[in-house]
Image (spheres, rainbow, N blue to C red):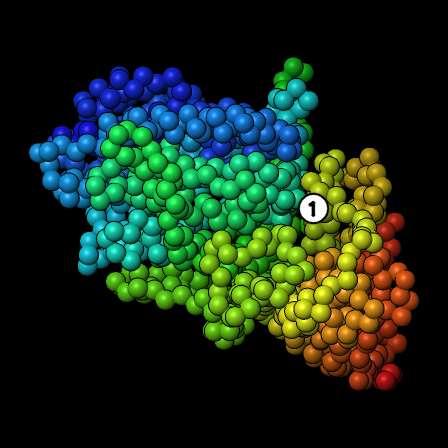
Amino acid sequence: MLESYVTPILMSYVNRYIKNLKPSDLQLSLWGGDVVLSKLELKLDVLEQELKLPFTFLSGHIHELRIHVPWTKLGSEPVVITINTMECILKLKDGVQDDHESCGSSSTNRSTTESAKTAVKSRRIQQATPDSDLPPGYVQSLIWRVINNVNIVINNLILKYVEDDIVLSVNITSAECYTVDEFWDRAFMDISATDLVLRKVINFSDCTVCLDKRNASGKIEFYQDPLLYKCSFRTRLHFTYDNLNSKMPSIIKIHTLVESLKLSITDQQLPMFIRIMQLGISLYYGEIGNFKDGENEDLVCHTKDVLGNISGSEVEIGNDMQYISPESYVQQDDDQQQGWVSWAWSFVPAIVGNDDDEGDFLGTDDGTTMNQHKLPALKDPIVSVGFYCTKATITFKLTEMQTESSYYSPQKVKSKEILCWEQEGTTVEVLMSGESFFDCQIGFVGCQALCLKGIMGIKDFEENMNRNDAAYFFNCGENLSTKGMTYLTNSLFDYRSPENNGIHAEFMLDAAAHKEMYTEIAGMQRFGAFYMDYLYTMESSSGKVLVSGSQPDVTSVKTEDFGNVHEMSTKSLIVGPLSLRFDSSAVHRIMKMIVCALEHEYEPYSKSKQDSVDGTKAVPSPEEVAALEEYIPTRITNFTILKCTVTIPIAEFNLLGHLLPVIMGQKSSSSFLNTTNLQPLRPLPCIQILVDKMVLEHSVPMYAEQLVQTVSSLSQPSDNLLHYCYSHCYLKIFGFQAGLSSLDINGSYSSPVAVVPPFSTAVYGKMLKCPNYWSKRSHVAVEECIFELPNLTIQATRAQTFLMQAIWQSWAYTGNISSPVVNEALVNEVFQSSGLILCLK
């Protein structure tokens, strides 16, 4: 019977993560075709051990679990697993000690793992005997077909993260994963010899993200507006296999599309939001817990079934139809260290499945297990992850407390929108192959920022002010109506992509070829507003790309490893033609955001280490010096801005006196401003700056401390080695010019009056890394700066000088809200007369 094969698979997953289940009752219910389990508690220790996240689970439960197995139509209808209301609460682990306590001691983990293996041994023999009435080949094919078409439905998924006074909650009304055909329509599909592809879709409906502050007792007094409210998005997964016997795909594509993304951040949420962002950055760089230095205990690879039956490769079925339970684990060596990058990459097999389990524990006829040699490491799959958003808006709000008319009525929080960022055609793409190749590309087609309503008592953009023409203070790039859907190029949502036309996609995994294809020009042609390409590669000294497991830990590379491994990290960022206006409304809104971001008392996740000189460092050998001379890994960043226009009008009102003290670390003023209507000044004098191109180049050694420690120990280091001990910065500006202009009541600028004709300049600077190692060598320069200015011309009349002085005083004087009065005759004289020329060279 098929039940003897399918039932153990389903039971192993359910019993593995859920407490207090009776396998006998579960088995009988499964054979009946439907299982309904209510009020289930999750095994939190199992989740922590398998995920190996820097978080610990405070609670986790499932309200209802339903499993539907169509026994009579297993070959044509999917198994449906439905979860109704699942809630988990997480917190950050306090440290290495808590990390061990939450998962148990090392000895406890070992004993738990061994007992699990023992249980698997006895169970595997009972489940490995196929029914003699069914051919093994047919059974294997049918079970794979069932697994590839499992439907997973989650209704009301709630995830909460708590830290200090922060409560971050994610609520997804509905999430469904199912198999689709080549047209991405729901279907019952299987991998065939003619089409070695499996496609799946995950739809998320009504995703809401909230960020609230709790008091000392852990309760939320006032609920803030959601960060994200009822956002729906869909994900397409495309798995390509080399052959029918492959259990791990060779190419994995996971792309997500969001049509509309509306984010909202209040002044109280901004510090908490930045705190969450800092947490992600600290986790990435391994500055929290023990992820940077590696786990010192026996690490067990439990990441196999993290995302469930996404690719259909979670259950390993051998040619002899022997059932390999997911509880048979692959144990790593005791001295193996795991960095954050390695930990993150370990989730790729978790998504697509892994068949390494068969290499450690294989059942024998006498009911025992024998330890086998590990199978050769599989080739790392090519993984492509993409996020695409058609239109996104981020709104910043100011909140204020309001009390109802009744004395006993509770206080309510009222928010007011003051700033909005709009963005079109956003793309985030990541391509990786093992730990030796990683590329991330980010771009968007167009973006703009605008002011909304009043700020701090100044009504400058209320509906009755009729100032919509001046609301937009930042514009960059194009819009989708003129650019088209180029941001979706070669994605799974692009009908022209190879995967949507039955063609195998090709990926550029060579660094040199990658740079030739993905140039700044190509990035601007696809996007238009912003393009970033971050490329990291790791190659052996012979020029061959390393396979996973053969390279050293990138977080602890030693000096002697420099010659064996060639690492390269390059970041190219380019910003298209942009227009930026620093008027009073925009400046004070931005300054207010900075003030709100600084109003917190959070302790930093990591503190900067003071440079300590290690006097016991041995002098490197000639071979090590020769390896350093040949190649030193460096991080290179290129930042380019094209056609930049910056406008600085005279300040119509000035609130910097209330904002700057807070930014400078002083206490904020307790006085509040009275609400006043702004009387706009038109024409509005302004300084206009135009730059044809600005290029910033920066380079820094990857492992500065190890490099400087080694080079400083040499009696006479070469100029080449000294060069790499510095961080270098080169700024080049082309076509810089400045002039005076004016903004009329219709929002149009007058022809600029040139004050500084176009000129070009360059600045070069370098700074020594870890200067404490060079304290005894005074001849080694700590800093150096070179400024190049071929020529400079400044021309201005007396009236133009007075006008520029008035603009400067309107911003420099912080004692009054009102701006200086500008004589209309002075403005007319500036834009009608030509003045004397003062030349400086």
x, y percentage for residue 426? 49, 57
Residue at 51% in and 47% down:
344
Above-or-below relation of 451 to 731? above
Tell me if I can see residue 366 in this picture. yes
x, y percentage for residue 281? 62, 47
On screen, residue 744 versus residue 336, left or right, reads right
Residue at 18% in and 29% down:
3
Image quarter for residue 316? top left
Q: In which quarter of the image is the N terminus?
A: top left
Which residue is outermost to the left?
A: 133
Residue at 37% in and 49% down:
375
Q: Name the residue under label 1.
A: 593
Residue at 61% in and 24% down:
220
Above-or-below relation of 429 to 603? below
- Between 179 and 295, the one lying in front of the other is 295
- Between 384 and 327, the one lying in front of the other is 327
